[in-house]
Image: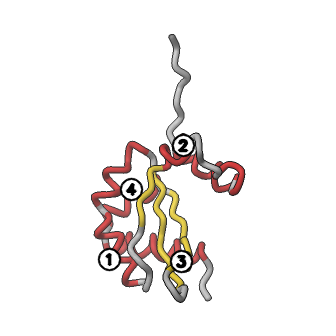
Amino acid sequence: MLSEPLLVQEFIHLMRRTYPQPSKVLRHCYIKLVTVHWGQPPSRLDYFAIYCPNTLFETVSEQKEAFGHISRYMGLADPVCINANRLLRDPMSKLKKEAPRFWLELHWLLPAQLPETS
């Protein structure tokens, strides 16, 4: 079984070789392999979650077809693009408690915001 970091690196490598222009946007994103069990009886479903800052969300969403092509080539489901700003700013999110390391890694994606002066 291949590990998550190895599959993510392979995804990025294939994107660079196949789609050089859309792959440039991935430098500013956090990519995570997600495994869920779906259906009755449960079957395993693997896909990439691409977490991107608010400023790049539209650009990443436009390139979803290219990302999906590579994911299907790797035997995975289509990737999901997630707005990291919305996820981190959600007051109902339990991400900080349940996955503090992942929560911090997502904060590194976001551009530094200066405090508002009034």
Q: Position of residue 64 (x, y in %)?
A: 32, 65
Closer to the camera: disc 2 or disc 4?
Answer: 2
Relative vertical location of residue 24 with respect to residue 68 in this rendering, above or below: above
Dot 1: within a 10 Å radius of its alpha carbon, few (fewer than 14), some, or many (20 or more) residues?
A: some
Color theme of the render = secondary structure
Q: Which residue is mark 1?
A: 69
Closer to the camera: disc 2 or disc 3?
Answer: 2
Q: Which residue is mark 2?
A: 90
Name the residue located 45 percent from the left edge and 74 percent from the top edge. Answer: 11
Name the residue located 57 percent from the left edge and 77 percent from the top edge. Answer: 6
Q: Are marks 3 and 1 in contact (CB under 8 Å)?
A: no
Amino acid on which disc 1 is placed: His
User: What separation in Å lies between label 2 and label 4 (alpha carbons)?
Assistant: 24 Å
Q: Position of residue 87 (x, y in %)?
A: 52, 48
Closer to the camera: disc 4 or disc 1?
Answer: 1
Label at residue 11: none
Quadrant location of the N terminus in the rendered image = bottom right
Q: Which residue is mark 4?
A: 25
Amino acid on which disc 2 is placed: Asp
Amino acid on which disc 3 is placed: Leu
Q: Are marks 4 and 3 in contact (CB under 8 Å)?
A: no
